[in-house]
Amino acid sequence: MTLDDTLSSNPARRDEDAALRRKPNRACCYTIDEGYLLPTLLSAFQLRRDLPAGIADVVILCFGAPSGATRAAAELCAAEGVRFRLEPSAVLDGNPMICARFFLPRLLAGDYTDLLYIDGDTQIAGSLAPLLTHPLAEGRILAVPDPMAVMIASTDGPWPARRAYFRGIGIADRAQERYFNSGVMRSGMSDWDAVSRECLDLCRREGDGFAFRDQDALNLVVGDRSELASFRWNFPPFFLNFGAERAIGPRLYHFMSNPRPWQGAFRPWGSDWHAPYGTLAARHPGLAGTMRPLRRARYCRYVVQQRVKQFRESRVWGAPGVRARIAAMEARASI
């Protein structure tokens, strides 16, 4: 009896193999323009390599005109098992790129029933299969608290003013402590379609008054329908400044603000997180032009800035009370 005969005689293994061969109904999606090509490709390839093909497709939707870089990206994605689609910017109906995620249901209609959206300024450090297969009730949006939610009840620094701002746009105090980040979110496709339409309408009417345009809109529209997950699935790298990585065990790192690791080996991530971008660019010169080098003066400012931030954040965010709030959020996380 051959190995194939043995496998075909095992019903459980047959079912498992058939499931892996079927086109998945889940998609992990990125929405970008050419300026974010290289970091997004790195994230998508890391995700694909750690995720069984039968669980989800990995899809990059790039908005803009064809170019040498987009053609190189499409060829590379085909080799890496990632779907790459170039869409004209006109499909966004004049909305900024930050709202492109709201067009996923229209562009992927009929292809998938379950969606995980991921920002391109991320790196994947482990399988996201548990996040993708976590049972999610109809109507719910799975997301991770924004770091602001940790500090929003503080009476020091900028937080009272930030709390007043949130109240002013209609996010109540209790909801502020559940305020989620828009960089990693999972939803049923039909639920995301409904949320997206409401968010687009809200951004058109009120967006100019929002400090965090799409994220504020999402928190207002989703409200208490959010289900909060661990920082493991959307880890802010400045948490490295006070040792939170050891307790949380991140699988997805989200570089939420400048500088970002493709711009240099800055603190707190250093060369470990910077080097993969240079390696990818060196192997595929057609993509290298999308990485715009920093001017020396700006680079030097970032070096100093990151040292100062590391000093300050290790003391503010590493304080026992703040650590306790993070630990409480982790304890309540659904996954």
Image (tube, rainbow, N blue to C red):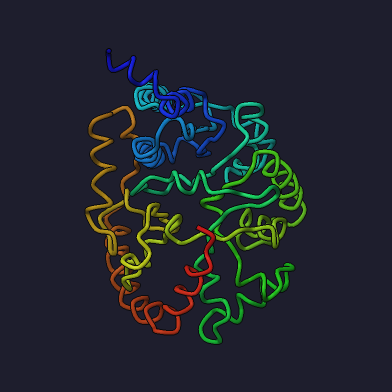
Q: Residue at x 50, y 44 (%)?
A: 132
Q: Residue at x 70, y 61 (%)?
A: 223
Tell me if I can see residue 208 in this picture. Answer: no
In the image, taking residue 183 as reference, residue 96 lies left or right, namely: right
Q: Position of residue 218 (x, y in %)?
A: 66, 55
Q: Going by the picture, which residue comes out furthest to the bottom?
A: 155
In the image, taking residue 127 as reference, residue 157 lies left or right, namely: right
Between residue 211 and residue 175, name the one nearer to us. 175
Q: Residue at x 49, y 49 (%)?
A: 131
Give the quarter of the image for residue 259: bottom left
Q: Position of residue 184 (x, y in %)?
A: 52, 51
Q: Residue at x 64, y 42 (%)?
A: 188
Q: Position of residue 47 (x, y in %)?
A: 39, 40
Between residue 52 and residue 270, name the one nearer to us. 52
Q: Is residue 60 above or below residue 156?
A: above
Tell me if I can see residue 174 in this picture. Answer: yes
Q: Position of residue 224 (x, y in %)?
A: 70, 62
In this rendering, the count of numbered labels is: 0
Q: Is residue 249 above or below residue 60?
A: below
Give the quarter of the image for residue 311: bottom left
* Quarter of the figure with the N terminus: top left
In the image, taking residue 146 as reference, residue 127 lies left or right, namely: left
